[in-house]
Image (cartoon, coloured by chain):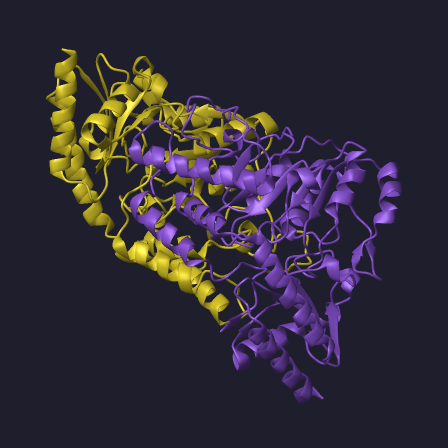
Chain colours: A yellow, B purple
């Protein structure tokens, strides 16, 4: 099988991830706790170590809270619903947001009456229309801005630093969804500037497993608790404990998933992964450009794209392309709308029922891209 | 090490659970999806099969929704915050509730102004005072009733069938927290009668892993969505899809954890586990009763207790007992309040800073209980 759905989840993971998870599953999968007994302390130490590695990865110091959640989606529910915004607050989001942000904002909009507004999209370039932002933000003050770092549909690297610096002038809380970027391009809190919260997923470009995500509260944003429960501490208190991590971390830690993330972080060479995926991205786009009757949804600026390439094929619905690639070529791609509700009105891909998405990963090869291109050419020929 | 913290999480798990998780991690840990490609369909089939096994376990038919969540705590947040209750609705809970219910109800109380009320406790027997319920429910109509099935502090089997039948006369929504019972005693929706929702944890008596829990919506209670996100389906819809399972299942499924639960269910022999744990429970209580200066927090009625035994030792704070058992005897127990905020005012164990809790599991032996009893006797002797 040629696996080209790495944007959904990277697969496979490094051997060390599998080994660490199996080992911890067998030896340490107990309820992590501070003082209880040796194994519980060991499990807790593994969590502490993994958080430390996350801090190092994003370049923040030891005092910055890292909250572990079962997934980045859960983390984003906690962030968005925890925001101390008021009715009529205006919250902006990029046109590239995933439903882990979009649906949660919509849900909050229905409950609280906040106003949500999309940042403008430039159809000529496939990018955010930065020039308009100062006017938008001046007209309607941003209470918060949500930006994905890399579009999970077009591979576009959103210029979050520029966006966040403009919104910060108006006091906005800036939230970065790093699901598609952390582990691939630099996500450095200091260099990005003006980022308040970074939400992350363990199972994508970090090459960790399902079951672990979270957020880094870079500037210590006060968030109301949204999901609560037992914490193994302060049990008689019906409120969550007051610690800036523990107040958002309910239920037993998934120590097996954390062990996987820990091993993944030890194996991570983000720069190498970027170089490899960037090479494959351009190789793939060049290959696709040689095929007639193909529409490629990629930002024009080569510097602003990596890892993910979407396209549609004339004469085919995208889901049919996916089915044929699977059944006749054993190539796994994702087709459709990819949980990204806003971008498709700009791409105008609904006549194809969405896009065919190639999600590249560090284990993909040029030979696999060659096989994909060959398959698509055959599809074109069949339909010619 | 003698592991006696099975009430926190059972450990170890059956070998088959570890094997299944490692296999699925290596071969199938992709984003489960319906039509996308072969592996995604296989992963989806594993989810379908596991839900089917959960339905069989609780004796409901194929049409009953089984919602998978990353944990029972997340599930209870979804249930409690999804309830279509109004300000001034009265929600009852047992004195034995865990913070996965207690804190969530308290959180809702602060947000919505519902009224929460504890069911009465009988200090003479350590049981719920059933006789008072008809009067309580008549006086203040129950909108919902939350009962844990087995107390995670005293091992008391709560007579949920009786409680739920009384509350159902007033139209209450009855929610069972089966964290400590599913896989140990019978949790049969038909026999329990009047249960509307059963929340379950994968990693306790079912002997599955962390990362998988959920709820079975036996009577199809309408719940508002509380946690939302991508579903891999209906992506252009900013609301969750309308399916009675999919509307509550956001984010990528943790297929590795589900594989573990699946293997655990294949290995489950609940009756054998009950018999073994019941034998150990009574053996342990008898052993403890022979020690002077020990206070045992267990319901008087032998038929109504299993799996968990709490006690305190005169002259010791409970956390110190735990530390000594760990350091000098390599025996792992949990001490303190066990995330159960209500019961301790009845047990009056605060002078000991909570209890020493023995959580029994299917791999424990009489010899291990002997070692524990011997250790406690030595502690007593040291302090005599």
Please state the horizontal and vertical placement of residue B38, each as a whole percent of the image: 30, 33
Q: Residue at x 30, y 17 (%)?
A: A349
Please state if A280 lies on the left or on the right of B13 as rendered.
Answer: left
Against B86, is A56 above or below?
below
Please state the horizontal and vertical placement of residue A33, each as a whole percent of the image: 53, 64
Please state the horizontal and vertical placement of residue B351, each as a whole percent of the image: 74, 71
Which quadrant of the figure contains the N terminus of chain A? top left
Instruction: Mark yes or no: residue B132 visible.
Output: yes
Can you tell which quarter of the image residue A98 is in? top left
Please state if B354 lies on the left or on the right of A144 as rendered.
Answer: right
Q: Residue at x 53, y 59 (%)?
A: B10
Against A317, is B225 above or below?
below
Nearest to the observer: residue B39 or residue A333: B39
Q: Residue at x 44, y 28 (%)?
A: A137
Q: Residue at x 53, y 47 (%)?
A: B71
Nearest to the observer: residue A288 or residue A134: A288
Please state if B190 lies on the left or on the right of A51 as rendered.
Answer: right
Instruction: Mark yes or no: residue A162 visible.
Output: no
Report how many numbered discs are placed on residues in the image.
Answer: 0
Which quadrant of the figure contains the C terminus of chain A? top left
Please state the horizontal and vertical placement of residue B370, each as a whole percent of the image: 60, 78
Against A377, is A159 above or below?
below
Nearest to the observer: residue B145 or residue A311: B145
């Amino acid at each position: 099988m040629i696996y080209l759905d790495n944007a959904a989840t990277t697969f496979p993971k490094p051997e060390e991830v599998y080994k660490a998870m199996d080992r911890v599953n067998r030896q340490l999968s107990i309820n992590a706790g501070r003082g209880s007994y040796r194994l519980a302390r060991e499990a807790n130490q593994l969590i502490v170590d993994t958080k430390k590695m996350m801090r190092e990865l994003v370049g923040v110091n030891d005092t910055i809270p890292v909250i572990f959640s079962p997934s980045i989606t859960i983390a984003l529910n906690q962030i968005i619903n925890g925001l101390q915004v008021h009715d009529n607050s205006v919250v902006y989001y990029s046109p590239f947001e995933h439903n882990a942000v979009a649906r949660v904002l919509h849900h909050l909009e229905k409950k609280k009456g906040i106003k949500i507004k999309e940042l403008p999209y430039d159809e000529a370039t496939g990018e955010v229309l930065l020039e308009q932002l100062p006017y938008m933000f001046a007209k309607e003050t941003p209470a918060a801005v949500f930006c994905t770092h890399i579009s999970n549909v077009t591979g576009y690297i959103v210029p979050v630093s520029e966006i966040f610096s403009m919104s910060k002038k108006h006091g906005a809380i800036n939230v970065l969804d790093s699901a598609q970027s952390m582990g691939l391009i630099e996500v450095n809190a200091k260099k990005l500037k003006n980022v308040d919260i970074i939400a992350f997923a363990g199972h994508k470009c970090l090459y960790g497993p399902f079951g672990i995500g979270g957020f880094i509260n870079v500037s210590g944003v006060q968030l109301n608790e949204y999901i609560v429960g037992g914490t193994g501490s302060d049990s008689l208190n019906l409120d969550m404990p007051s610690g800036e991590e523990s107040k958002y971390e309910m239920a037993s830690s998934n120590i097996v998933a954390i062990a996987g993330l820990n091993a993944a972080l030890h194996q991570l060479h983000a720069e190498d992964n970027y170089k490899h995926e960037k090479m494959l991205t351009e190789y793939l786009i060049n290959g696709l450009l040689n095929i007639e009757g193909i529409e490629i949804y990629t930002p024009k600026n080569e510097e602003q794209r990596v890892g993910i390439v979407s396209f549609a094929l004339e004469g085919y619905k995208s889901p049919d392309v996916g089915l044929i690639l699977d059944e006749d070529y054993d190539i796994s791609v994702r087709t459709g709308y990819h949980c990204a509700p806003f971008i498709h009105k700009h791409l105008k891909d609904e006549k194809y029922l969405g896009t065919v998405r190639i999600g590249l990963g560090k284990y993909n090869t040029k030979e696999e891209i060659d096989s994909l291109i060959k398959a698509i050419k055959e599809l074109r020929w069949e339909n010619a």
